Image (cartoon, grey):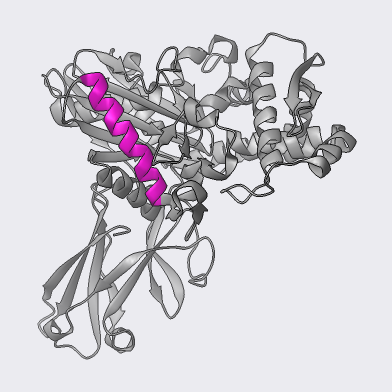
């Protein structure tokens, strides 16, 4: 097979791209400053004369007003946009993501010496369908052919070759702790000779990641520890006060220093109380030295209750599955940059037992490219695999409902399988007339029902416009809802006739976020 499949891990902190042709993987080298080509920072810089840089080259730019990091987080916001001075233009998050994808597209084609490829892009479990659609639109507008978008932990699953080697049943937990989210997936794998069934039983997410840890280290440790020095630097700063992200330049620099200290501490075998130091250059050219210990970071984790929050999410994963308990788990795999922190891996060891997950045996080398790699293998297994017969079932990681009397009414439960169809539900003609036969669809990641439609936990997905002229009843019609695997929501509308026959009147389809 000569078809090139490309997995794009559009991470909050880093970008990773892997190509796969059914036989061999190839890491896409994204820029010349990359020693191994495994990842680059998800940072974009808009220079003068239409020059655009991403990755390390962008991160090294000192002009913070025209540099944007963590665009993935901005895609979560309803109306985020910023003015970029060097290009004299305002851009929203989708525009900026599209610019990043454009440069990725060029690098992929250059590396592979091809003009066309199929791509699979990954996203967090707790990304809404609207956010998912924004990523997809950004990639498509950059000229990338997007075949599928899947969740990050489910993609990582397919990078683990050992899971598909031996016959029998395995219960697997994927723990993916990245830059912006913690995502978990509970999967059953059944292999019988050439037949492999992959069933995602549940998925959950926590909106907290490495960038939150970095910000917390600065605010809760470094600033309190060096308050007088930092206040002096801030007061004397000649830097522009506000960046394109709406933050002070010095704040961004201090958070980046916190990130660097954190990564060095957990990448080095030092005692918990040994201080790791780093120099800081302020805008006046003065050097300062700041120190941080592993124990100080751990104390912050304890104070923030991160262990309890992670255990709560792990418990929720199993509560959402009727099939298995944590005692049934046979394999646990940890991915994502924040899994480099042994404090979090130790939580997994305590929760599942060291015979299931041994924190000390964890290999950090495989975590960075696993999601992009797994994305390519997922698509290959689903669409192109010839040696094995793969049957793959994903779950819906959110609830789906409609607006009734300004309230969110849930119809599809979280962690139902894609393709699940509801029973018949009533819609009253009186209410449809009030809204000119417009039906509003919403989703929520929390198990809520009957709350106000303006509740921040409720996310608008789109509208369905029924064809009023097709309906003869003056009382009630029936409908069913079905979420298809290609992010299309199908709604079927019926009338019940006098002889009690239920007759299909029309099908409507909602392209989520479109």
Would residue 52 appear left or right of 232 to someone viewing this image? left
Q: Locate residue 266, reporting x and y percent.
A: 65, 17
Q: Nearer the viewer, residue 486 or 76?
A: 76
| Quadrant of the image occupied by residue 404 | bottom left
Segment colored magenta: 94-112
Query: Is residue 225 something that shows in the picture?
Result: yes
Q: Locate residue 33, reporting x and y percent.
A: 45, 18
Q: Which residue is located at x 69 percent, y 8 percent?
A: 269
Q: Which residue is located at x 19 percent, y 20 percent?
A: 113
Magenta stretch holds residue 107: yes
Where 240 sits versus 421, above or below? above
Would residue 224 appear left or right of 266 to someone viewing this image? right
Where 245 sits versus 54, above or below? below
Q: Locate residue 426, reporting x and y percent.
A: 29, 76
Principal secondary structure, stretch drawn in magenta? helix
Magenta stretch holds residue 303: no
| Quadrant of the image occupied by residue 510 | bottom left
Q: Which residue is located at x 16 percent, y 24 percent?
A: 114
The tally of labels here is: 0
Q: Locate residue 50, reporting x and y percent.
A: 38, 41
| Quadrant of the image occupied by residue 328 | top left
- Identify the image quadrant of the C terminus: bottom left
Query: Is residue 206 something that shows in the picture?
Result: no
- Identify the image quadrant of the N terminus: top left
Q: Which residue is located at x 48 percent, y 38 percent?
A: 45
């Amino acid at each position: 097979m000569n078809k090139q499949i490309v997995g794009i891990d559009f991470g909050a902190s880093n970008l990773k791209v892997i190509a796969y042709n059914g036989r061999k993987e190839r890491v896409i080298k994204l820029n010349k400053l990359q020693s191994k080509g495994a990842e680059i920072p998800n940072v974009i810089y808009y220079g003068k004369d239409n020059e655009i840089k991403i990755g390390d080259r962008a991160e090294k730019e000192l002009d913070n007003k025209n540099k944007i990091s963590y665009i993935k987080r901005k895609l979560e916001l309803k109306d985020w946009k910023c003015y970029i001075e060097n290009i004299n233009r305002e851009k929203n998050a989708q525009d900026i993501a599209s610019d990043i994808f454009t440069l990725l597209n060029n690098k992929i084609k250059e590396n592979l010496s091809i003009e066309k490829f199929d791509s699979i892009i990954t996203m967090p479990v707790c990304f809404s369908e609207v956010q998912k659609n924004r990523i997809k639109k950004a990639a498509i507008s950059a000229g990338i052919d997007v075949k599928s978008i899947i969740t990050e932990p489910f993609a990582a699953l397919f990078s683990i070759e050992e899971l598909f080697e031996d016959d029998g049943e395995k219960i697997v937990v994927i723990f993916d702790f990245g830059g912006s989210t913690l995502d978990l997936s509970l999967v059953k794998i059944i292999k019988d000779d050439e037949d492999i069934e992959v069933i995602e039983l549940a998925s959950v997410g926590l909106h907290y990641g490495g960038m939150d840890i970095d910000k917390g280290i600065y605010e809760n440790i470094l600033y309190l520890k060096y308050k007088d020095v930092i206040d002096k630097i801030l007061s004397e700063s000649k830097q522009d006060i506000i960046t394109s992200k709406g933050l002070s330049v010095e704040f961004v620099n201090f958070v980046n220093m916190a990130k660097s200290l954190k990564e060095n501490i957990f990448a080095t075998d030092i005692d918990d109380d040994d201080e790791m130091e780093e120099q800081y250059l302020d805008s006046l050219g003065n050097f300062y030295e700041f120190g941080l210990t592993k124990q100080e970071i751990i104390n912050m984790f304890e104070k923030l209750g991160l262990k309890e929050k992670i255990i709560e999410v792990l418990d929720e994963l199993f509560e959402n599955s009727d099939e298995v308990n944590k005692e049934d788990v046979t394999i646990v795999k940890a991915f994502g940059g924040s899994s480099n922190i042994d404090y979090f891996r130790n939580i997994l060891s305590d929760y599942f037992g060291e015979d299931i997950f041994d924190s000390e045996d964890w290999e950090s080398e495989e975590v960075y490219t696993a999601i992009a790699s797994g994305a390519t293998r997922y698509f290959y297994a689903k669409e192109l695999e010839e040696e094995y017969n793969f049957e793959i079932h994903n779950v819906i990681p959110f609830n789906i409902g409609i607006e009734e009397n300004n309230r969110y009414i849930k119809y599809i439960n979280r962690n139902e399988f894609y393709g699940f169809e509801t029973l018949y539900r009533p819609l009253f003609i009186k209410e449809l007339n009030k809204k000119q036969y417009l039906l509003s669809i919403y989703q929520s990641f929390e198990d809520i029902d009957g709350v106000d439609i303006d509740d921040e936990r409720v996310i608008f997905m789109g509208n369905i416009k029924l064809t009023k002229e097709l309906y003869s009843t003056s009382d009630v019609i029936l409908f069913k809802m079905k979420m298809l695997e290609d992010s299309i929501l199908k709604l079927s509308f019926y009338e019940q006739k006098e002889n009690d026959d239920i007759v299909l009147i029309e099908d409507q389809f909602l392209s989520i976020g479109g």
